[in-house]
Amino acid sequence: MEIIEKQYLSVESLLSYKTRSTYGKLGKLIEHISESLKFLEMEQTGSIIFSLKENTYGTDETILDLEFFVPVGKEFKSNEFYVYKPQFRLCNAVRARHSGTYDTLVNSRKRIQDYLSQNSYQPITDYYYYVSRNNLVDIYVGINGNIV
């Protein structure tokens, strides 16, 4: 897995949606979000980005707190389900490409964490997952540009 430094990611006009799911259902959930936009009379204009936090909650399977950022073609009024965000921007990020199933995302994130530790980089953002194509996900994390 190649890791690239000094990356930049910027997307405008986003629908933000928060939910919970599992690694095993993540792929189907992403498909469902893309397909459901037509019912909201919105058009997806780019790749979905998401962040996740793992929780066990005493269950056999890890429960994920997820936030999806979906680029859409028009501004809309936020409501209790969907929030409009005018821009998403990450500067000075480290990026790695994950190839495989969503179940193995945690392994790729671990490799990035090891890389950051070996290079004494301090992450200052969550990990963001940019779904580029089937089974290809670019993982971004913003790092502190200061060296003391």
Image (cartoon, rainbow, N blue to C red):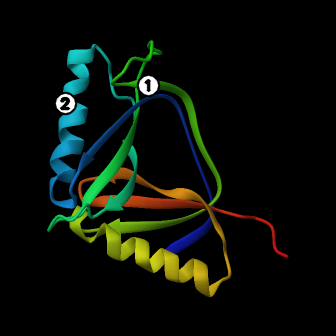
Considering only order in the chain, which callout, 2 or 1, is on the residue closer to the N terminus?
2
Residue that numbered label 2 is attached to? 35
Structural crowding at the residue carrying mark 2, measured as other residues with C-alpha within 10 Å and reported as few (<14), some (14–19) or many (≥20): few
User: Residue 53, relative to residue 48: is it above or below?
Assistant: below
Q: Quadrant of residue 82?
A: top left
Mark 1 belongs to which amino acid? Val
Asked whether the viewer can see residue 47, the reply is no
Give whichever of 131, 76 is nearer the camera: 76
Q: Quadrant of residue 110?
A: bottom left
The percent coordinates of residue 97 (x first, y second) are 41, 66
Mark 2 belongs to which amino acid? Glu
Q: Which residue: 71% across, 64% down?
A: 144
The percent coordinates of residue 93 (x first, y second) are 61, 60
User: Residue 103, relative to residue 67: is it above or below?
Assistant: below
**Relative side of 128 to 122, left or right:** left
Task: Say which element carries label 2.
Answer: helix
Residue that numbered label 1 is attached to? 83
Q: Quadrant of the N terminus?
A: bottom left
Q: Which residue: 81% across, 74% down?
A: 147
Q: Please, which residue is most extreme toward the right here?
A: 148
Residue 97's disc is: none
Q: Nearer the viewer, mark 1 or mark 2?
A: 1
Q: Quadrant of residue 145?
A: bottom right
Q: Which residue: 21% across, 56% down?
A: 22
User: Residue 28, relative to residue 99: is it above or below?
Assistant: above
Task: Say which element carries label 1.
Answer: strand
